[in-house]
Amino acid sequence: MFILSLTYVKPNEEADRHMEPHMAWVKEGYAKGWFLASGRKVPRTGGVIFAVGQRPEIEAYVAADPFTIHGVCEYEITEVAITTANDGLEILKG
């Protein structure tokens, strides 16, 4: 599993300008079966996406995020080897 942590490097107003294409990119990640959950950080300094898949595919997909392309945010990709999960969350174990 991967934790994709987005940190804005531009003002929220700049993020808002690219939010619609970014959210289309997020929805596509869900359609591909890669994204499990996502949301904004509180306070609004970026976001977090929980993802599954192969690291090269995830890295390439992150590079195609409109936020990445327009320099709105930087991503930190953390791989986690899940060993224990609640019933119903076995997909996290990879």
Image (spheres, rainbow, N blue to C red):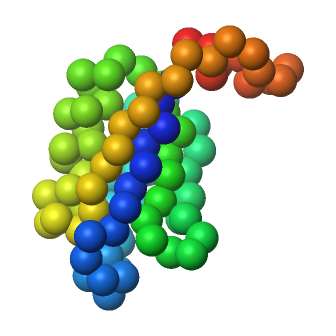
10 sits to left or right of 5:
left
Q: Is residue 32 above or below residue 63?
A: above
50 sits to left or right of 6:
right
Q: Nearer the viewer, residue 30 or 91?
A: 91
Q: Is residue 24 above or below residue 55?
A: below
Quarter-wise, where is residue 16 in the image?
bottom left
Q: Nearer the viewer, residue 25 or 72?
A: 72
Residue farthest right in this picture? 87
Q: What residue appears at the point 50 percent right and 75 percent down from the top-left corner? A: 44
Please state the total of marks drawn on the protein image. Answer: 0
Pinpoint residue 33: horizontal percent, then vertical percent: 48, 29
Q: What residue appears at the point 14 percent right and 58 percent down from the top-left corner? A: 69
- For the C terminus, the image quarter is top right
Q: What residue appears at the point 63 percent right and 18 percent down from the top-left corner? A: 82
Q: What residue appears at the point 38 percent right and 56 percent down from the top-left corner? A: 6
21 sits to left or right of 38:
left
Pinpoint residue 66: horizontal percent, then vertical percent: 22, 59
41 sits to left or right of 12:
right
Pinpoint residue 22: horizontal percent, then vertical percent: 33, 61
Pinpoint residue 76: horizontal percent, then vertical percent: 35, 44
Can residue 5 be seen here?
yes
